[in-house]
């Protein structure tokens, strides 16, 4: 494997020299294009790709100067591609898949992620919003309102963002208040009787104080399908989001930003599970309903309320920049799941969960690229989550319900530092490290209610454990030319061990560790009309935390021993004129378990449902890790009067994606087409007509095999609509 990776690295170096020659031929003596003072991208005259500012290393830098595989998307790009939530990001980010088990978010990046759920279980691909870590899986499904840009960092982020980012990171940066008054209102209507409303306002209050507020509302009047047993709609969503910021700048060297947000979500997407076609459930005949229908004795769904407050303080000292981010976030969600997947009232599961998190980060950074750049900080994190999980139905003939209540707490502290030193002209070395201490506690009790209503509780002994792990990053980068950067890096990522809150007596799973090697090349050439970035990577992955459905339909959590992952990422943009922009990206991925004895496997039964067996899954594909994913987009602008019309066409491809360790269930190869036409009428009005999944491709968000059935939750069908926007 190392020889294979070495061969790719040699090829990238050869390409670097070729690209350097091309860059020098096109731009003799050229220098870096400067970023605009406000951090926005600045267009090249007469066409050409734009500079993109990212904060992947916790400071503003040109994307092409960052030795990390990053895909960045501006607000304009997100809107043109129809990206409205974090789940949609998978359509424009090869290597990223986004599951929605029981309505909660489970991102996987380059094969690294976890499908387990429950309070205390965090994603391997971390989500940050304005520098604040979102620990809960409920908040991993987040609407994108007033977004300035999104950065997807591929590979473990074990130093500067080390909190459980063993697979990568989705960083969402929202718009800050500005000195210019602004008001934008948008209204839309789409099929399935869907009404959307959103607004954004910015108001300077004094010379040093400004505020903004955004809000969005989504009401879907008709579901994609019907619950045949109850006659009610399913695959139906209602949601509301709001975010407000107040920014105070008492001096040119000090900035204080207060942020508050709230989100409400009520949906059955991800919980409306139907038996898979041709696979008989244990308690009923073959499912004969429509593609988006279910036949359940219970109307399923999840209702989630989440919000938070953060305070960011920034100050420029003479020797360094200081940053403090203090944050609290709270989430409360309930979900109802029919665990027999039929109209037979055998088992209905109800979960009620509350999660609170507190975080505090202090950071100093300083230096210059020509001498020594450095960043150092302290990160403190506290978490408290509890859940009551009950089962009821004729499967419990002597009880009203049976279940458990669990509470998991975590306290984590980390110190980190990273330095970048110029070794020779155009050659720099980055070294970083982080050390994390974490304590976890689990307590709870089993409970049941008799038919007479008598509730019995049985406490279980408390459990506690601790983890201590170092993580690090080493990167060597070299400017082969002004617009050609090559780099080699080695990163170690860490995700804390965790208890399964549905198994009060079970031992915690061990921390998962990712050792990632990457060789990358970032180039801009042909008079800045082409940007091409390539990265080859290899992971050694051990003690992988994986979730699987237990016999009763609840999630079990376990460690798989080891896996090997390697592949290549390609990301390009071509802007031959100021009107035409072509972009695309692709990832080829090899992700296999190299050691996984005792893996759970489904054995279909002639009478319906499945029995289970333990197999050796060594050599099998990792879950939600398609071998090839790609995205391509065309954007063309036509001036019309005092405005313009933008045409956008977006295509996404994904090869087969296995959903279970035994390779029994998989989502076949998938192609999706999305499009939008937007007419900007002067600077004030805008009309957009859009369509997503235009070929009406049917596929599943999630698939699973348990003893009572093999099931799937349907993803979005074809949707289309129109938006009207006005700006003042």
Image (cartoon, grey):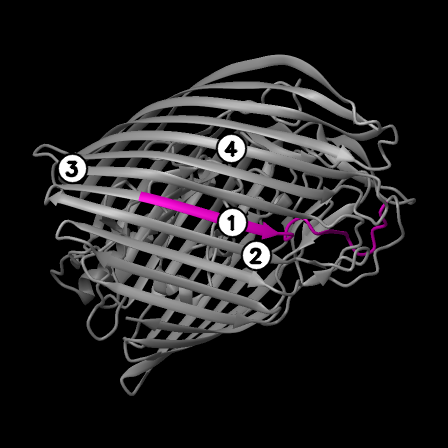
In front of the other: label 3 or label 1? 1
Q: Name the residue under label 2.
A: 238
Which of 400 and 95 lies nearest the eye of the viewer?
Answer: 400
Q: Distance between the residues labelled 3 and 1?
A: 34 Å
Earlier along the polypeptide chain: callout 3 or callout 2? Answer: 2
Q: Which of marks 3 and 4 is nearer the N terminus?
A: 3
Q: Which residue is drawn at 83% across and 51% down?
A: 279
Q: Where is residue 109 in the image (x, y as percent from the top left)?
A: 49, 45
Callout 1 crowding tier (Cα within 10 Å): few <14, some 14–19, many ≥20: some
Q: Nearer the viewer, mark 3 or mark 4?
A: 4
Would you identify the image quadrant in which residue 693 lies? bottom right
Cβ atoms under marks 1 and 4 closer than 8 Å: no
Marks 4 and 2, Cα distance to the nearest angstrom?
A: 22 Å
Residue 561 at least partly seen: no
Residue that mark 4 sits on:
355
Q: Does the magenta stretch include residue 400?
A: no
Characterize the local packing of mark 4: few (<14), some (14-19) or many (20 or more) Cα atoms within 10 angstroms: many
- Residue 475 vertical position relative to residue 530 in the rendered view, above or below: above
- Of residues 271 and 303, which is closer to you in this image? 303
Q: In this view, does 120 lie to the left or right of 598?
A: left
What is the CA distance from the residue labelled 1 to the residue labelled 2?
A: 8 Å
Q: Is residue 622 left or right of residue 395?
A: left
Q: Which mark is residue 315?
A: 3
Residue 388 vertical placement versus 256 (above, below): above
Please tell me which of labels 3 and 1 falls first in the chain: 1
Residue tagged 1? 264
Answer few, some or many: residues within 10 Å of disc 3's Cα (few below 14, many 20 plus, some between 14 and 19).
Answer: some
> Residue 82, percent across and down?
47, 65
Is residue 421 in view from this perspective?
yes
In the rendered structure, are the residues bearing label 1 and label 2 in contact, judged by CB atoms less than 8 Å apart?
A: yes
């Amino acid at each position: 494997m190392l020889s294979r990776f070495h061969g790719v690295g040699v090829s990238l170096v050869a390409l670097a020299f070729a690209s350097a020659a091309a860059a020098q031929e096109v731009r003799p003596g050229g220098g870096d294009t400067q970023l605009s003072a406000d951090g926005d991208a600045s267009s090249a005259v007469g066409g050409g790709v734009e500079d993109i500012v990212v904060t992947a290393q916790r400071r503003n830098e040109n994307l092409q100067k960052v030795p990390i595989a990053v895909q960045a998307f501006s607000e304009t790009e997100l809107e043109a591609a129809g990206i409205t939530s974090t789940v949609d990001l998978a359509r424009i980010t090869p290597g990223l898949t986004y599951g929605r088990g029981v309505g909660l978010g489970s991102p996987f990046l380059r094969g690294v992620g976890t499908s387990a759920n429950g309070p205390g279980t965090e994603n391997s691909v971390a989500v940050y919003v304005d520098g604040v870590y979102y620990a809960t899986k409920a908040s991993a499904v987040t609407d994108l309102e007033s977004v300035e840009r999104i950065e997807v960092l591929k590979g473990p982020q074990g130093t500067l963002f080390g909190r459980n980012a063993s697979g990568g990171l989705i960083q969402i940066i929202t718009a800050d208040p500005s000195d210019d008054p602004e008001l934008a209102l948008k209204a839309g209507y789409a099929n399935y009787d869907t009404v959307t409303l959103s607004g954004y306002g910015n108001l300077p209050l004094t010379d040093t104080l400004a505020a903004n507020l955004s809000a969005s509302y989504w009401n879907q009047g008709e579901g994609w399908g019907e619950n045949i047993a109850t006659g009610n709609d399913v695959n139906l969503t209602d949601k509301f989001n709001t975010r407000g910021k107040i920014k105070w700048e008492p001096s040119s060297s000090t900035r204080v930003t207060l942020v508050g947000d709230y989100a409400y979500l009520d949906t059955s997407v991800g919980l409306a599970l139907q038996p898979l076609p041709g696979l008989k459930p244990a308690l009923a005949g073959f499912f004969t309903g429509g593609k988006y229908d279910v036949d359940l004795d219970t109307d399923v769904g999840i209702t989630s309320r989440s919000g938070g407050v953060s305070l960011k303080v920034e100050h420029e000292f003479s020797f360094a920049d200081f940053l403090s981010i203090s944050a609290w976030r709270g989430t409360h969600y309930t979900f109802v799941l029919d665990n027999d997947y039929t109209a037979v009232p055998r088992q209905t599961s109800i979960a009620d969960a509350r999660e609170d998190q507190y975080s505090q980060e202090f950071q100093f950074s300083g230096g210059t690229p020509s001498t020594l750049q450095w960043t150092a900080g302290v990160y403190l994190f506290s978490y408290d989550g509890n859940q009551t999980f009950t089962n009821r139905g004729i499967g419990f003939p002597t009880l009203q319900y049976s279940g458990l209540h669990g509470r998991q707490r975590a306290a984590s502290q980390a110190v980190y530092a990273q330095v970048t030193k110029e070794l020779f002209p155009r050659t720099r070395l980055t070294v970083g490290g982080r050390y994390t201490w974490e304590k976890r506690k689990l307590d709870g009790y089993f409970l049941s209610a008799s038919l007479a209503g008598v509730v019995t509780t049985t406490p279980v002994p408390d459990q506690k454990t601790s983890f201590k792990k170092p993580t690090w990053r080493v990167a060597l980068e070299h400017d082969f030319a002004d617009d050609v950067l090559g780099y080699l890096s080695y990163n170690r990522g860490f995700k804390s061990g965790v208890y399964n809150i549905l198994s009060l007596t079970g031992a915690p799973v061990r921390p998962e560790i990712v050792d990632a090697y990457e060789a990358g090349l970032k180039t801009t050439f042909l008079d800045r009309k082409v940007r091409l970035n390539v990265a080859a990577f290899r992971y050694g992955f051990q003690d992988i935390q994986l979730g699987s459905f237990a016999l009763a339909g609840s999630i079990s959590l376990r460690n798989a021993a080891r896996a090997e992952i390697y592949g290549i990422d390609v990301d390009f943009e071509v802007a031959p004129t100021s009107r035409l922009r072509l972009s695309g990206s692709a990832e080829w991925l090899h992700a296999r378990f190299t050691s996984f004895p005792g893996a759970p496997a489904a054995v279909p039964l002639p009478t319906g449902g499945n029995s289970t067996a333990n197999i050796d899954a060594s050599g099998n594909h990792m879950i939600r890790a398609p071998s090839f994913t790609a995205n391509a987009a065309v954007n063309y602008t036509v001036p019309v009067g005092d405005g313009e019309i933008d045409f956008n066409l977006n295509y996404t491809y994904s090869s087969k994606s296995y959903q279970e360790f035994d390779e029994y269930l998989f989502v076949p190869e998938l192609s999706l087409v999305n499009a939008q036409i937007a007419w900007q009428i002067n600077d004030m009005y805008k009309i957009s007509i859009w369509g997503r999944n235009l070929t009406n491709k049917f596929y599943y968000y999630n698939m699973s095999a348990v003893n009572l059935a093999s099931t799937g939750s349907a993803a979005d069908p074809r949707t289309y609509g129109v938006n009207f926007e006005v700006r003042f």
